[in-house]
Amino acid sequence: MTEFFSRRPDGTLAAEQVPLARIAAEFGTPTYIYSRAALTTAYNAYAAACKGRNAHVQYAVKANSNLAVLQVFAKLGAGFDIVSGGELLRVIAAGGDPRKVVFSGVAKSEADMALALQHDVRGFNVESIPELDRLNAVAGRLGKRARVSLRINPDVDAKTHPYISTGLKGNKFGVAFEDVLPTYRSAAALPHIDVAGIDCHIGSQITEVAPYLEALDKVLDVVEALEAEGIKLEHIDVGGGLGITYDDETPPDITGFATTLIDRVAARGHGHREVLFEPGRSLVGNAGVLLTQVEFLKPGAAKNFCIVDAAMNDLARPAMYEAFHRIEPVAPRDDAASTYDVVGPVCESGDWLGRDRALAVQPGDLLAVMSAGAYGFVMSSNYNTRGRAAEVMVDGNTVHLVRERELPADLFANECLLKD
């Protein structure tokens, strides 16, 4: 529970000043609910570390790409970290400045590169020599120069789930550490490439500072080696991945974490270089919940099941990562609790939102799946021809519908029957 999603004096859950039951009555379930105040507070925690320092925040759009969420961050002054041309167009539609966008990702297409160059993005985080060659060719055809950073793979263990670890030598991301210097030399020799910086991102849901500092020291070693060869870098991108509290995790304070990294850069003699942060989960994760309704209670010989109207197609993290989300009743009951697996309607045994949860619930009750603001809606699907959830943004005592619920007809509107 946070100050943004808390219980009212009558014991019911609210988002800021709005009861969740009111949102369910108006918009139905399942529905994602975001708190504007929570988004703003998390962003300002990074901004406080960057104030007066040569540092800037690039929100990682992949964590939650709703236009209203992007709009909030754009108004606060954020830049953006994207991984597709579609995310770039979302940033622009939300009022973000493309010149403050960094384009990451291992498999940028020629079309996406051209789109980004035409919108004069700040730069590209490049992950291989073939990508460098492609970007150089596309920039040449367009009469542009592409500003690049190389994403290096420092072979540092982020101590997180293997599916979201990105900085080990066995991961697909980044340039292998032993190949970094020759790759920079190749980049510097290309006619339509400007070498601007260096990038490192070691994973997601990281709850310790030590792996960041280990990776950062390796990055700074590379910066110094490059400078000795006459290749000067303007910025150091330390990536994102800072974790949040889902259950009992104790991630570092955002401002203290960011300050520690900025200070390490300065202590190594690089305070004149800009430091970029690419936070995603730590900005939006605890700024959202998934609201769902209990459909049935189904006792079983080995398990009791609380069947709700949200499913793995709405929130994939539990099925994909066995991720934990706290599940809270919106209106607590005085009844004795029973132990349930909270499951959805999708025809898969992997369709669960929580296992072995003590809940006092009845059919028709509302449940809030907490900490669902990151990698929630963005990973949802239409499996079983299920429309994706509605999304709303709460701002004080006001609720804004920021995405309408999909209807079944929407899901096959672009399909065609055979002509005979």
Image (cartoon, grey):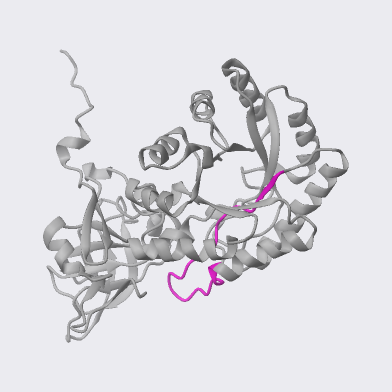
- The answer to which image quadrant residue 387 occupies is top left
- The extreme right residue here reads 228
Left or right of 275: which side holds 324?
A: left
Question: Quick one: quadrant of the N terminus?
Answer: bottom left
Q: How many labels does the image show?
A: 0
* Residue at 20% across, 68% down: 20
* Residue at 72% across, 43% down: 176
Q: Position of residue 286 (x, y in %)?
A: 40, 65
- The extreme front residue here reads 52
Q: Does the magenta stretch include residue 248?
A: yes
Secondary structure predominantly adopted by residues drawn in magenta: loop
Residue 185 seen anywhere in this rendered image of the structure:
yes
- The answer to which image quadrant residue 334 occupies is bottom left
Q: Position of residue 88 (x, y in %)?
A: 45, 37
Q: Position of residue 253 (x, y in %)?
A: 54, 72
Left or right of 78: which side holds 142?
A: right
Q: Does the magenta stretch include residue 199?
A: no
Q: Is residue 221 above or below residue 358?
A: above
Q: In this view, does 344 lie above or below 90?
A: below
Q: Nearer the viewer, residue 354 or 112?
A: 112
* Highlighted range, magenta: 234-254
Q: Which of 312 and 9 is in front in this view?
A: 9
* Residue at 68% across, 23% down: 192
- The answer to which image quadrant residue 133 occupies is top right
* Residue at 43% across, 42% down: 96
Q: Position of residue 346 (x, y in %)?
A: 25, 52
Residue 301 seen anywhere in this rendered image of the structure:
no
- The extreme top residue here reads 420
Q: Which of 302 and 118 is in front in this view?
A: 118
Question: Quick one: quadrant of the C terminus?
Answer: top left
